[in-house]
Every structure is written in C-alpha cells, then in structure tokens.
Amino acid sequence: METVWSIFHYGFFQRALLAGLSVGISCALLGVFLILRKAAMIGHGLAHVSFAGVAIGLSLGWLPLLSALFFTVITAGVLVKIRQKTGLYSDTVIALVSSFGFALGILLVSLSQRINVELFSYLFGDILTISSLEVIVSILLALSLVIIIIVYFREFLYTTFDPEAAQVAGISGDKVELLLTVLSGITVVLGMKVVGILLVVSLMVIPAASALRIARTFRQALLGAVVFSLGEIFIGLCLSFWLDIPAAAAIVLLSFGLYILIVLLTKRSAQ
Amino acid sequence: MPSVVNNLNHQELPLIEVIDLTFRYNRVEVLSDINLVVHKGDFLALIGPNGAGKTTLIKLLLGLLRPHRGKIKLFQRDLKEFKDWALIGYIPQKAIHFESFFPISVREAVALNLPQARWYDFWTKKINEREVVKALETVGMQDYIEERIGHLSGGQQQRVFIARALVSRPQILILDEPTTGVDAITQEKFYDLLAHLNQEKGLTIIIVTHEIGVVNRHVNKVACLNRSLVYHGTHAEFCQSDYFRQILDEGHHLIGHKH
C-alpha cells in the first residue's frame, strides 16, 4: 500500500532530495556573506549569465550543465575584475552582466533549431529529472564549500565586516571577493535544476535573510541559514510531490512564508 | 610664519617617517610634499579642515593608497617591504558604520585581528580566549564578550574596536575620527582610555580628529594638515603658534564630518 512516505523509495526523489539539500547548503552559506556584503543580487545576475551558458550547450549539443558552469565561472571572474577596475557599484555591474547574459541566451535560443523543452527545465527548475552526475557534483560542491568557509572563515568574515581593517591586517579583499563570486557562479549553475534560473537567487537570499534576523553570532547565522535552507527544501519537495505542485514554487513560497513569520515574531519580541 | 617643523629633536629612530610625500587623486594634488615623523610614545593629533587630506595620509601610511611621489618608512623599513602589519592597530573612520543587524559577537570581532590565529582557532572557543579577554579587559569590555556588537552603544563599540586593534599587540594605534556621532561624556571617557594606553602601556597613538579640546587635553604632538603640512610640532608650541590662534579666532576652520 502506498503511503505518504513511499516517495522516499523512489530513485528520482532520492536524487532530487540529495541534490536539493546539497545545493541548499551551498546557497545558504554563500547567501549570508552576499547579503552582508550588499551583493545579494549577484546570484540573480549570474543565473541570467548561466542562461546563456545553457543556451550555448543546447545549441552546440554539449552538456548544458558543463557549458553553463564554464561560461558562468568565467563571467563571474570578469564581473569582479570590472567592478574592481572601474570602481562601479556592485549592483550596476550585476545589471550590466546579467542583461548581457540573458540577451545572449535569447539570441542563441532564437538562432538554434535544436533547443527544445529542456530549456524550460533550466528556466523554471525540474528537480525531479536531476541526473546522478548532477547529484554527485552538487554533493562535491557543498562539501568543498563547507571546507573553504571553515578554513577561510577569518578572511571571509573580516573582509565582510570591515574591509579596510582587513586589508591592513594583510587580507586581500579583492581575492576574497573573487573567490566568493566564482563559488556563487558554480552554486547558481547547480541550483538551476533545483528551482530554475529565475528563482535560484531565492535559495541564496531567503534562508540567509531569515537566519540574520535571529542570529547573535556569525557562526549562528551560518548554521541557521543552513538549517532553514535544508528544512525548506525538504518540506517543499515533499509538498510538491504530495500536492502535485511545482517543486520550485513550493520551496520558494514556503521559504518566503517562513521569512515573513520570522520577521513578525522578531518584530514582536523586539517591541 | 614660523617653521612648519618645530622642536622635534629625538635621539631615537622614528617609528614612522614620511619624506616628501605627494599624492594625487584624479590629477588633483591632494597632499603636497609632506614630511612627518612619529616617535615611540608620541600621542599625535592629526588635525585640519574637511578635505585637508587627513584620511588620505592615514591610508598612505597603511599602504592602502600608493603615493605619487615620496617615501614612507615604518619601523625604519620602506613601506613596500614592510610586512609586520600586526605592529599597527587601525580603527577606520567607517568602523562603527556597519549594519546594526550584522551578526557578529564581541568575541568574534576581536578574534578577527589575531594574526597568529589558525583556521581552526575560530571554531574552538578556548584557543586564544586569553588574548581576546585580555584585550577586552584593557578597554573594560570583558563582560560583553558574548554580546552582538550591534546591540552595544556607540562608545562601547569603539572600545571593542580598540580591543580588536590591541589584540595583535601593536606598537602603534591609528584612529581615524573615532568619536564621530558619540556624545560628549563618552568621548571624554574614550580619550581618557587612549591617554591611559599611551602613558601606561607606552602605545604610540595617531588620531585624526576635529575636536580641538581633545588636542589640548591629551596629545603631546600636533600635525596640522591642509593639503600640505601647516604645522608639525609639540603640543606646547602648538598652543603658542599662529595656526592655533587662527583656529581659535575662526573656529569654523575645524568642522567635523557629518555622518
């Protein structure tokens, strides 16, 4: 007899869960730093760039994940260099790069005859069709990111909290910014299948924003963001299956609802 | 006009030496031919009107900007070769202008400046605890070690930033307008603390300030900057100088930044 728990026996659901939770950990950890560095929209910008990467892959017959990964990481590096060399605000550079990426993607899609419905799975997410390779890459990324953040905790936190004092202490803010942006690019590409290009920024911003409302220390903020992210992705995926609704929408709306609840609760306790 | 450099004969070698320094920003000369020396035990006030180049000079001293011409020596070494940044504690002008929701505890903020800390030290509470507590005790903030910095008052935050600078055991402390937006009583306590660090702990202090009252009460050297060095000498002679009389006559010359 089928029960609500039967879904956990399905291979596709297990893969979805593993990939979703791994991407969730990466997004949540990066999100805390990006919000505090006033660069939350970098995920959105890089997601638009990854659209061009997917379009390149689909039109040339390459694996879209790899072409998106390559194109997004290169663009992430260029984005940081442009900002550092020109002194432009982050949001201006993100707007420039994201519009370029999306326009290039649209052009490639319109020129190519080979692009099919697969493109929509990247735009809106299709976590239940995620492949074993994507699961493995997502897990490896999450593990690498956790290790990088543990090892470079001082560098990441110091440059986020007080960049000038960090520089005097011998920490290069430019290198940390480059590392964070490239890691964001990789994470965004892996998050495409989970919630889609258009919503991937939500995985970076909403759990981190929720944790920042209640954390007293930085470690609590990182841990809180991961816990919120894992909980929201897990419950969102289950709801998606049980209620037969899109997983991306279920995860993002659940996250948003929880964030509003936390805002209301913390506002009341502050009063 | 009297000589710009007054009675600065020292036997000891200076900790900081600025030689014929010129800095341009977008082709505009912000600082011209600056010559300045700071010796061990000095409590130097760097004063001057808005746009005089005070913060720029501090950033040049810290290697955050590169001079167009001239030389800077720190601890008798050329700035380009200087690596012992732990010897210099720095509190930027913007230090207290962080987002109040930034989730960082006093412990975490102070530990950030531990130069000898290894990556795993930040994940274990006990390692380096003694160094962090000691720095906080020096500024009287040890009871707030677990507090989120955003929950502290402006004066308390400044003390935590001093502790952060002190934790690396510096010989020089550089503060850029540290009491902007802090009330008069807190300011007074803050400068008393700096005087204590200077006199009891032998810390050399450079402070960028607009508060002429502070200059009179605590410092022993003064450098007046207005794109070039207008005055550089002892505090006692500063009080006799034309520049000081000019400041008293035209108090509007020293106006603090509005933040």
Image: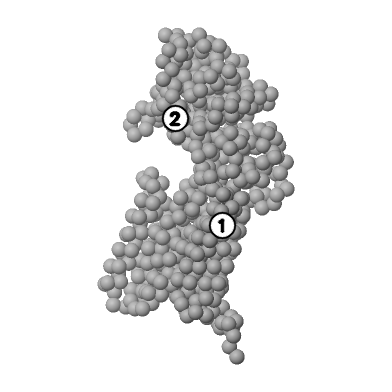
Residue drawn at (55%, 11%), measured in percent from left and top? B236
Q: Which mark is residue A265?
A: 1
- Quadrant assignment, res A222: bottom right
The residue at the point 69 percent across, 51 percent down is B124
Residue positioned 54% across, 76% down in the render: A238
Residue A152 at x, y percent in the picture: 58, 52
Tell me how far mark 1 sits from mark 2, CA to CA: 38 Å
- Chain under disc 2: B
Residue A37, position as x, y percentages in the image: 48, 49
10 Å crowding of disc 1: few (<14), some (14-19), many (20+): few
Which of labels 1 and 2 is toward the front?
Answer: 1
Place residue B226 in its image quadrant: top left
Residue A58 visible somewhere in the drawing: yes
Residue reaching furthest to the left = A111
> Against A56, is B228 above or below?
above
Residue to which mark 2 is pinned: B257
- Going by the numbered disc 2, the residue's amino acid type is His
Q: Is residue A98 left or right of residue A12?
A: left
Pinpoint the chain carrying mark 1. A
Asked which secondary structure carries label 2, the reply is loop
